[in-house]
Amino acid sequence: MLQHQRRVLRKNTVFERKGNLIVTDRGLQSLIIGQVQGDRLQQQLATTHAPGDACERAKVALDPNTLTMGFARRFTAYKRPNLLLSDPDRLYRLLSHPHYPVQLIIAGKAHPQDGAGKAMIQQWTQFLHQHPDLASRLVFISDYDMLVAEQLVQGIDLWINTPRRPWEACGTSGMKVLVNGGLNLSELDGWWAEAYAPELGWALGDRNEHDADSDWDRQEAEALYRLLEEEVIPLFYHQRDADGCPCGWVAKVRESMSRLTPQFSSNRMLQDYISTLYVPASHLLAARQDRSVAEAICRWQKDIAGHWNGLHFGELTVRSEGEVHHFGIPVYLDDLDANAIAVQLYANGNTDREAVMYPMIRGDALSGGINSYHYACDVPAGRPAEDFTPRIVPQHEACLVPLESQKILWYR
Ligand SMILES: *Cc1c(COP(=O)(O)O)cnc(C)c1O
């Protein structure tokens, strides 16, 4: 252990400064992991009364000079934590390669009621039992928690994430890896769908959704093995300079750190919250200290509540001319002030297009009605006119809608 620590210190040299980023020697990643996770594995085996020889083997698990891959997350079907196990023989060959081996650290928990998740953990432990010779290369760390995650993201070279699109909301562990100088190989889902470029890491998937299609799972597993065999492993072991430093790998780490860390961090997240939400909200709050503003808001709320059920639309008309759809609709406002609401034209998002909303503009009063107006708007004919639906929402310059009023009246 002491020897390990000394090696960590000796190797803990700044590799290069780029702006305010520091890229360290790659060897360091694996050293930390070998020491910390090896210790943890020994403890884990000891508490489960594993045979003495298994505990002994844990002492030499994980080699600092071997490409180290990490896969850690909740074990649940959509994360496909057994995709790497689709072809166990192929995985075995990867892990046991005599010249260019890889080592894999798996960590994770399944929800107690998630039978499929638990079965996937069993699949990994079975694979481990069937291949005792892989004990130094394949490690399952139980009780995945923030401490394990912290050590893993510091120590791994490659972080693998294989969710089924579009289920990955974000994928924050891949971002944690960024700042620690690891590279990502992930499905193009969640954050990686936004962040990926070939210079920064590796991608799985075609950006389309395939549900739980087992054929597609097979194809993605094949792509995953192929990426590892043909791209990831060669990049790590080839192109080494005289000091043994993997130049192509380090170039990718630099690119990934310098381009992605400023963009995918909690600093940026907080900045976004501050600029788009907290600051505007604090201005609105300050404006409300003025009694007349507060009273106007109360009147507006009361008027909306009192007249909302009386609002209704007339017949929608659409005229399509060349590149433009002209939409028009009469709106009957009961006794509500027309400034208390907004009429909008809305279209849902779908696989090809984002959701869009256009304000409809209030025109002339209708001569055949009281407090009723014609609303209109022109939109580009890129989307079919049937995609669009008018709606009425409350509006007040001193309030945030829909935060402060959730009412909405759809045309149909
Ligand atoms: C980061 C982290 C997660 C979330 O990881 P995802 O990639 O977003 O699924 C879950 N559990 C722990 C302990 C973590 O540290």
Image (cartoon, grey):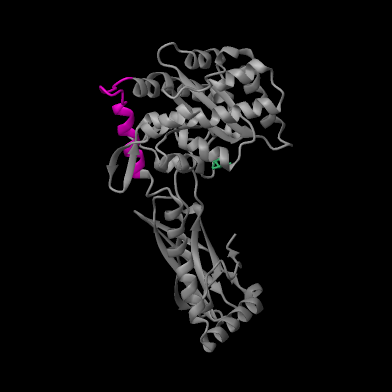
Q: Where is residue 297 in the image (x, y as percent from the top left)?
A: 56, 81
Furthest-front residue in this view: 2
136 relative to 401, above or below = above
- Magenta residues span 238-259
Residue 297 is one of the magenta-drawn residues: no
Q: Residue at x 37, y 31 (%)?
A: 26
**For residue 335, what is the image quadrant?**
bottom right
Residue 276 drawn at (x, y percent): 44, 63
x 35%, y 20%: residue: 237
In the depicted view, which residue is nearer to us: 361 or 175?
175
Image-based side of 81 in relation to 266, left or right:
right
| 249 in the magenta segment | yes
Q: Quadrant of ligand 1?
A: top right
For this orientation, the residue located farthest to the bottom is 292
Q: Nearer the viewer, residue 388 or 12?
A: 12
User: Residue 8 is drawn in which quadrant?
Assistant: top left
Q: Residue furthest left?
A: 242
Is residue 412 among the parts visible in the rendering? yes
Is 351 above or below relative to 68?
Answer: below
Q: Quadrant of residue 207?
A: top left
Question: Where is residue 301 shown, x and y percent of the image?
Answer: 61, 78
Image: 333 above or below 406:
below
* Towards the viewer: 47 or 163: 47
